[in-house]
Structure formats: structure tokens, C-alpha cells
Amino acid sequence: MKKSISLAIFVLLALKFKAQPDTLIVYDLNTHNIDTVLPVAFNPAITSDKTSSSLGTLSNPVALSLTPPTSNLFSGANFSALAKAVSFFNLSDYPVRTAVALRTYSNNISSRLCSGIMVAPRFVLSAGHCACLSGSFKIYDSIQAIPAYNNGNIPSNIPASMVKKIYIFKTYYNNTSWDDISLYELNEPIGIQTGWVGIGFNSNSNFTANKVFHKFSYPGAPQPSNPSVVYNGDTLYYNYGYIDESQNYYQINSSAAEGVPGQSGSSLLYTDNNEYYSVGVMNFSTQYMHYKITNPVFYQLKNIIENNPLSVKENKGVIKNINFYPNPFNNKAILEFEYDPAEKYIIQIKDGLGKNVQTISNINSGRIIVSQNELGKGIYILELSTLKGYSYNCKMIIN
């Protein structure tokens, strides 16, 4: 968590906000190459919008409270202080399991980085400063995104994935603005199983009035004002309640509302227990300040989430006329697609943890028999890919 900044500096930073689209800088963790995604057009007159949310194949939604808390409150606010999430929820339920711990690996040593939340099958929403400071990306051997990470344990029934790319705004990378927000693109589409929440913005007056917002995060250091209170970054925490709004931030107007390092990148989640979406990302510890997702920010992130312009297009018809049947199945199923003899194909079947459990290569036709072989009953991901980088994936159920 970044240290609090003076009011004067904050005002100067706030003046740098621009209601216009911004290029996105893309950092590849494997190659260390940097690319860009040019901004997309948007209508600045639109006052609210959101992307979709999904329960995922694991389903099991849990109702979040729509009334503010009455105990364990930040002084002078209707927002609760940190408490372990297991005191409220089964962590494998939706949307709790969409909360992600971002862990780094350097020289085979794991360390906490930040918090995040699943916002698409392959994308985690977090803060820009978790990945980049003053025009330089932080260098790690690798980063792992772990949903429902708790008490130092990676759950056996919920998949995790390594990160392959990070997206941040160019003005933040150049240190000329404060669009402190990022997307982490994952190697595996684990959101198919975990589900995900949307992202959204609402610039209408009184949007936040009498609405409860929820927060799942991974605090990972001593409490700044009370070092005797220590968090390890390995346990999921939860708090919720009413929030306050300034021009560029959602926050808690209480001197006791102090964030902890490791909470950076965690979302303010809004739900009516039907739709779920993040409206802001935590940046500063003072007053729990969350960078507000605005109209120009939203549409640039939406373009990445829904169109993924620099990466593999999933289920976009690049591999044409695909049909997989029967599904569910036992023993055998058939995958049909429009075969190109000039292309080379490979099929990989992955379990719930993203581990490859079966590979089919030497494909020379557009009709493939997929056999159960030694696979047990359950849900798998079937991925058909090509050397050109095209890909199709679907849920495969063996019963």
C-alpha cells in the first residue's frame, strides 16, 4: 500500500486526470517485451455502464449483505474494519472465490504482491503500482494469481494460473497522470470455473447513496498506525458498508480507515446479488482511497477484457465451425471443426487446476475422437490451438 500523500500533492495529481482515452502499455512477463494497445473511441455522454459477470461452472452463489454493518466499524463510518473472510463465508462460494492473491516468485522464493479480483476468464483487475513505478516494470521470475487463497493454502478445488501480461495506462507509465489501475492477463482461463465479476462506472449523482459495497483483500504487513497488528498476506479478509465519493476516488471518511500493504489493487465490489461489478481499485491507505473507474478508463479496459486485441482470441470464430458433442459424455466424444491442411493443430485437456492431463497431436482432419482414457468424472477444459496462435476452448464434462 502506498503511503498517504499530502493534500497539496493530491490536488496536483487530481488536476492531471483527463476525460479522454489513453493508450495502454502491455508488458510481457516471459519475454520482457513492451507493446501498446491504442485507445478505442467512446461516448463521454454515457454516465454508466458495466461488463458482464459470471458464476462460473463452480456456481454456488452466496448472498452478500445489502444492509450496512452495525459492529466492528471504522470510527465515524458505516464501514466495517478488517475481519477474516472465513468468519462470514465459505471461501469456495461465488463471488468470494473471485478474490485473488497475486504472489511473486524470484529465485524460487514466493512473496506477496497485491490483491485483485477476477473480471473475465483470463483477467484480474488490480492496481497499476503493483506492477510498475515511475516508468519501470517490476521484474519477477513469475507472478501467480491464486483465487480463494487462504491461510497460506492454494485450494485444491479452485484453479490458479501464472500471469503472462500486464496492462497499465501510458500516462501512469510515463508518470504524468494517476490512472493507477491494471489488468493481469493469465495463461489459463480459470474464470470459466471460478466465475468473475464485471467492472463498471456510474457518474450519476448519489450513485453510492445508501448502497453497500464489499471488499475482499489480502493485507500483508503490520498495520501502519499499530505495528503490533500484523497481517501475513496469506489470508483473505473481508469488510463492507457505506462509502463516500470525491471527484476521482471512492473512500471512507474516517481517520481510522487505514489500509494495509497488500490490500493495494483490491476492489470495491457492488452487487444487488444479481449483478456484480467493481467500481474502484484501492491505491492509498489513508481513508481507504480507491481509484474510481471512470468512463474513459472503463472503455479502454473493456476493450482488453472483451476483445483481447494483442492475445489469443478465445471462441471468436478464428477456428471456424466448431462443434463438440456429446457433452457431457463418457467414454468418447467428437470435436469437429473447419480443418486447414496448411495449419498445425494441438488439443490439450486440462483439469480444474489448469494442469494438462491429456494431449492430442498429429491432427490431420477436422473430426477428432476425444477419449476419456484414464480421466475421472468431472469438469475439464478442452483447448484446441494452432501454431498461428489461434485458440478455442470449451468446458468438457465427463459423467
Image (spheres, grey):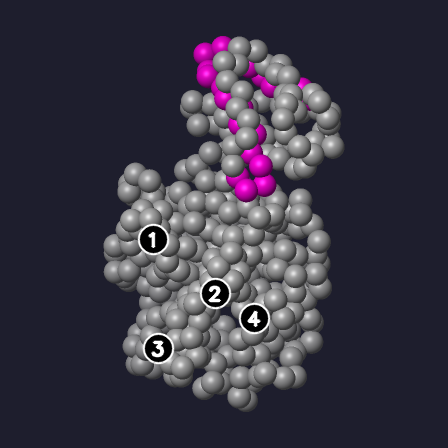
Secondary structure at numbered mark 1: strand
Residue 91: % across, % down: 62, 60
Q: Which residue is mark 2?
A: 218
Q: How far is mark 4 from mark 1, CA to CA?
A: 25 Å
Which of these two is toward me, 384 or 307? 384
Q: How far is mark 3 from mark 1, CA to CA?
A: 29 Å
For the residues carrying marks 1 and 2, which lies nearer the camera in this image? 1
For the residues carrying marks 2 and 3, which lies nearer the camera in this image? 2
Marked residue nearer the N-terminal end (3 or 1): 3
Q: Which residue is mark 3?
A: 4
Q: How far is mark 4 from mark 2, CA to CA?
A: 10 Å
Q: Amino acid at mark 3?
A: Ser
Marked residue nearer the N-terminal end (4 or 2): 4
Q: Is residue 367 visible?
A: yes
Which of these two is toward me, 246 or 230? 230
Q: Which residue is mark 1?
A: 109
Secondary structure at numbered mark 3: loop
Marked residue nearer the N-terminal end (3 or 4): 3
Q: Which residue is mark 4?
A: 84
Residue 220: % across, % down: 42, 68
Image position of 128 with respect to 16: above or below: above
| Classed neighbour count for the residue bearing mark 1: other residues with Cα under 10 Å, few (<14), some (14–19), many (≥20) | few
For the residues carrying marks 3 and 1, which lies nearer the camera in this image? 1
